[in-house]
Every structure is written in structure tokens, then in C-alpha cells.
Image: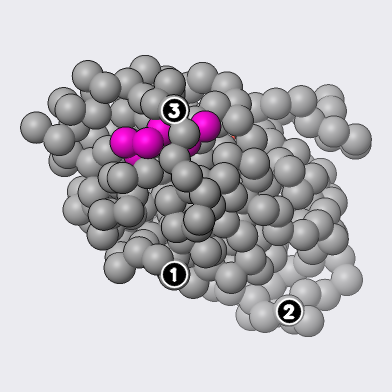
Amino acid sequence: MIPATLITHLQAARRIVVLTGAGVSAESGVPTFREAQTGLWTRYRPEDLATPEAFLRNPKLIWDWYSWRKKLVTEVQPNPGHYALAEIENYIATFTLVTQNVDGLHQRAGSHNVLELHGNILRTKCFDEGTLVAKGDENGSVPPRCPRCGGLLRPDVVWFGELLPSDVLRQAMQAAQTCDTFFSVGTSALVQPAAALPWLALEHGAVVVEVNPQATPLTDHAAYVLPGPSGVVLPELVRAVWGKNSPSTDENHHPGRSEANHS
Ligand code: BJW
């Protein structure tokens, strides 16, 4: 069900950016943010946990939430969506994977050029100094304390109200402005500044493709919408574009928008 015109476009594509969100890891068993939370954490909203204020209010609660999630991400495996994205990197001259995910599953699937906008849950840093702490330097308290200054340790992720790593954001914006094709995959496209990246790509003439079973604020503006789980859609796309499968119908193409993007 990959539109024939999209297949043709991708066969000639030179610069592709893919922005991923929690939906890409959903099929690995990692819960998304704005869908139902599971287990112990059903009574909390991520917006109430993923802030510096929440951490300072109740450091143990937040540390425990992240400990639970850290354990989860080390126990799950990358899914076919992650592997398909790692494979596309082999076919495209300039391929940038920009992820909002903090789980490291793209790297474990073999992706190399990965920009982590929101950090990585498996790294730990000092809340006060911002310096990274090597594994094993964490002491036994909950949360552990910084071996240098005694401050509280926290995961090296970006919480609401915090700045994204400036160099990573700059590279992502640069890639979005200069790509010929921009994929938005498995993200609700709500959280800024990541959500602005597809719009930046649109403004600069890229063909924007969305992969998501649900509609988002981007859906009506994308040239192509591939509605389905990324673990199914992305491998199908790789087969259709770079494999031996023949192209299918054009039913998900929004022709007017695509032409506008190329004008
Ligand atoms: C599938 C699927 C399958 C399911 N296949 N798909 C401008 C306007 C208004 C507000 C702001 C603004 N600029 C900044 C803000 C404030 C704020 C913000 O954006 N708020 C919004 C809620 C409005 N942004 C910030 O605070 C950022 N900092 C910043 O901008 O600093 C400067 C500043 C501050 C304050 C004011 C102004 C400027 C920082 C944002 C940090 C986000 N951090 C988190 C937590 C990371 C750590 C952790 O993991 O705990 O990042 S929040 C959470 O949301 C996480 C995610 O990376 C992020 C995005 O979520 P994502 O990935 O899109 O997940 P979901 O759950 O929302 O969606 C999943 C999607 O998957 C759904 O669409 C499903 O349909 C789909 N799906 N199964 C494909 N199988």
C-alpha cells in the first residue's frame, strides 16, 4: 500500500530526515506518553513526572519511575520498524535520524547517525552540575548522590521546561531545512521544539511523509500519510522502494500538497 509516486520519489531521494517518537518503540513493548500508561504508573501523567519541579518535589518517586523504565528498555528488543530505519541509512547518501526517544533502541538496531533530542535514559547526570556520571559511580541512596558535589543524580533526559542540547537541536534543524524528504514516524507531533521540525522541512520544500495509525496536527499537511504501525509500514516501505516488490496504488497520496511542496 505504498503509493507508486512515493516509491519513485524515494528511489531518487538524496537527503532524508526521519523524526521518530514513542510510537516507534510501542511495538517493542515500551509504553508511549499520551496513550494509556501501564502498571505501577497508571495514576500519573508523564507531564506531572517529567519536569524538574516534580523531581525536586519528590526525587524518590521520579527516580523510581525512571528506574522502572530503565529496566524495561534494557529488557526489550528493537522491532522491525527500528531495523527498517537502520536499513534505509544504507541506501541514502545523507540520512539523519532525529529521535525524541530516550531508549537507545535505534542504535541497538544498527542506526549510526542518530540525534537524540531528549537525551538518553541510560545515562545519569548531576542535577546541580549537569555533569555525566559513569556507571558504577552511583552510590546506594535513592536517588543516588553525585560523587563530586553530593547533589542529586537524575537521568540525562530533557524534561518539560528544560532546553534541548543546543548542538543536537541545531543539527536537527539544519538537516530538516536541507532535506528532500522528511518522515515523521510514531510521534503525536505536539511537543516543541521537535514538533516544529516537519514544518521547517515543509517550508523548505521537502516532501513530508507521516507514519502513524492516528491523526496528528501534521496529518493534513503531509504529502503522504501511511496510516499504520511503523513496525509494519516501514519494512513494507523498504521492500517497496529498495527491494524487489512492485509498487502498489496511490490511494494515500495527497497530490495537491505534494506538488505544492515541490514548487
Ligand atoms: C504509533 C504506534 C505504532 C502508537 N507505530 N506510531 C511552544 C508552544 C507551546 C509550548 C511550548 C513551546 N515551546 C516549548 C514549549 C513547552 C514544552 C511543550 O512542547 N509543551 C507541549 C506539551 C505543548 N516544551 C518543552 O518544555 C521543551 N523545552 C523547551 O522548549 O525549552 C524552551 C522553552 C521552555 C518553556 C517554554 C518555552 C520554551 C522540552 C520538551 C521535553 C519533552 N520531554 C519528554 C520527556 C523525556 C524524558 C522521558 O522520556 O521521560 O519527551 S515529554 C515526552 O513527549 C517525551 C517525548 O519524547 C515527547 C514526545 O512524545 P511522542 O514521542 O510524540 O509520544 P506520544 O505518546 O505523544 O505519541 C505517540 C504517537 O505514536 C501517537 O501519535 C500514536 O498514535 C503513535 N503510535 N503506536 C507508529 N505502532
Amino acid type assigned to the residue bearing label 2 in the image: Lys
Amino acid type assigned to the residue bearing label 3 in the image: Thr
Magenta-drawn stretch contains 250? no
Q: SS for tag 3?
A: loop
Q: Which residue is more in the foreground, 154 or 224?
A: 224
Task: State if disc 3 and disc 2 touch (CB < 8 Å).
Answer: no
Q: CA distance from mark 2 to mark 3?
A: 51 Å
Task: Tell me the number on the disc at residue 135.
Answer: 2
Residue at screen point 79% across, 31% down: 37
Task: Tell me the number on the disc at residue 249.
Answer: 3
Amino acid type assigned to the residue bearing label 1 in the image: Asn
Residue at screen point 23% across, 49% down: 180
Specify start and end residues of the magenta stretch as a single range. Answer: 1-6
Residue 223's spot in the image, x, y percent?
A: 32, 28
Indicate which label's residue lies in the foreground, 1 or 3.
3
Does 210 sit above or below residue 165?
Answer: above
Q: Quick check: 153 left or right of 127? A: right
Task: Tell me the number on the disc at residue 90.
Answer: 1
For marks 1 and 3 on the same chain, the one whose residue lies earlier in the sequence: 1
Residue 94's spot in the image, x, y percent?
A: 30, 65
Residue 233's spot in the image, x, y percent?
A: 58, 40
Can residue 161 be seen here? The reply is no
Question: Counting other residues with Cα less than 10 Å from the Cα at mark 2, is it few (<14), some (14-19), or many (20 or more)?
Answer: few
For marks 2 and 3 on the same chain, the one whose residue lies earlier in the sequence: 2
